[in-house]
Image: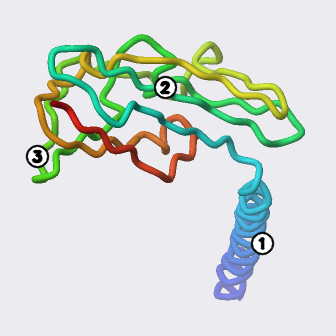
Amino acid sequence: MKTFKLILPALALSLFVACSTTTRHSEKVAATADADNQADTTLVATMAIPAASTANSPIEMTFTVYNRTDSIKTFCKWHTPFEPLMSKYLDITSANGEEASYKGPMAKRIMPPPADSYVSIKPKDSLSIKVDLTKAYDIKPGSYVVSYNSQAISGLSITDSVKISVK
């Protein structure tokens, strides 16, 4: 009888735990399905830089975010040109593999980002901003590839890098 009194609560606890695990799993599956359905509704960003520039002069990059969906979308402006220079959000690599030195500030952040850290874009609209790369990176004469490295923070998708020649 004592064994039965010990087994019954253990069995009930096992059943309860098993049910809650299944519920969590189905929530994760639903969240994954929602993320998959939103894959075609993400914001897309592009970078444009003149193909050639001269040393000791500004190198202006145009950063544009497109919302090709039918609803308002938001992205975190942290680690993008849409906030004052606060972080290294670009990788600028020379033809021989050396990275241009980042000389700007590096901010520490609280998580999650506060509401004022997000920018909204209307449906079928875009937002552009220009930034001088020489204010944050030590770019010497040579050929470079510029790529965006902060997709995970901003939520923006950029698939292409940009090439530039500095003389």
Q: Nearer the viewer, residue 43 or 12?
A: 43
Mark in the foreground, 1 or 2: 2
Q: Which residue is mark 2?
A: 62
Say which residue label 1 marks: 19
Above or below 19: residue 146 = above
Image location of residue 154, percent across then percent down? 53, 35
Query: Is 10 situated left or right of 59 in this image?
Result: right
Within 10 Å of the Cα at label 2, are there few (<14), some (14-19), or many (20+) other Cα atoms? some
**Residue 33: percent from left, percent from top:** 77, 65
Residue at the far right in the pictured view: 70
Disc 3 residue type (three-letter): Glu
Foreground pick, 30 / 20: 30
| Mark linked to residue 98 | 3
Q: CA distance from mark 3 to mark 2?
A: 23 Å
Q: What color scheme is it? A: rainbow
Q: Residue at x 71, y 69 (%)?
A: 25
Residue 54, horizontal then vertical, whole percent: 20, 23
Which quadrant does the N terminus fall into?
bottom right
Q: Secondary structure at mark 1?
A: helix
Amino acid at the residue labelled 2: Thr
Q: Earlier in the sequence, mark 3 or mark 2?
A: 2
First in sequence: mark 1 or mark 3? 1
Going from the N terminus, do you reach mark 1 or mark 2 first?
1
Numbered disc 2: secondary structure: strand
Q: Position of residue 41 (x, y in %)?
A: 76, 49
Q: Quadrant of residue 87?
A: top left
